[in-house]
Image (cartoon, grey):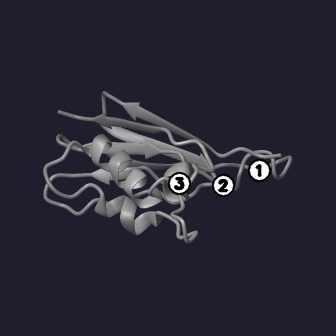
Amino acid sequence: MFVTMACAVIDLARWTIRYASGGHPSPVLLRPGEAPSLPFGSSGPMVGVFPEIDFTSEEHPFMPGDGYVFYTDGVTEAMDHSGELFGNGRLLASFGGNKPPLGSLLEAVRAHAAGHPQSDDITIVAISRS
């Protein structure tokens, strides 16, 4: 048995975000004037696989206008009727246009699955800095 996990700490005095994960996908960074990106690498394996593992973290600036969208792997692993995964490419592409980010992501996942049964949980959480 295992789980994935993510932990993000926002330092409001320094305006930084520190992120660590155990097998969990990177949040999407939405920064004005830049393409959506996956700024954090995995800092460790899934939790529960090995009894003694050290997890590292990364710290990035949390600039005015930045947004981070956290999601469970049920988003990128959502399948259509042929078994094709939603994947990172569709994940990043779903943030284009003038739609609100969370609505457009969930709409894109549902459109991709086109009624195919959901195989994993889907959770989406967003934070932003004004």
Q: Residue 44 carries which label?
A: 2
Residue at the extreme right of the image, as rendered: 51
| Residue at far top of view | 13
Say what amino acid the circle numbered 3 marks. Answer: Pro
Q: Position of residue 65 (x, y in %)?
A: 17, 42
Q: Residue at x 37, y 64 (%)?
A: 90
State the image quarter where residue 23 is shown: bottom right
Q: What element carries label 3?
A: loop
Closer mark to the observer between disc 1 and disc 3: 3
Query: What residue do we see at 22% from left, 52% from top?
Result: 31
In front here: 98 or 19?
Answer: 98
Circle 3: is it few (<14), some (14-19), or many (20+) Cα within 10 Å?
many
> CA separation, marks 2 and 3?
11 Å
**Frontmost residue, 8 versus 69:** 69
Residue 101 image position (x, y, % from top left): 27, 45
- Residue 14's quadrant in the figure? top left
Three-letter amino acid code at the position of disc 1: Ile
Q: Left or right: where does residue 119 sit relative to residue 64?
A: right
The residue tagged 3 is: 25
Type of the residue with mark 2: Gly
Secondary element under disc 2, as helix, strand or loop, is loop
Rate crowding at label 2 as few (under 14), some (14 to 19) or many (20 or more) other CA atoms within 10 Å. Answer: some
- The earlier-in-sequence mark between 1 and 3 is 3
Residue highlighted by disc 1: 53
Quick one: quadrant of the C terminus? top left
Q: Where residue 89 appears, x then y in whole percent?
A: 39, 68
Q: Work out how far the residue at label 1 is from the one at label 3, CA to CA, in angstroms.
A: 18 Å
Numbered circle sitting on residue 45: none
Asked if marks 2 and 1 touch (Cβ < 8 Å), the reply is: yes
Query: Horizontal and vertical percent for residue 39?
Result: 39, 58
| Horizontal relation, residue 73 to residue 106: left or right | right
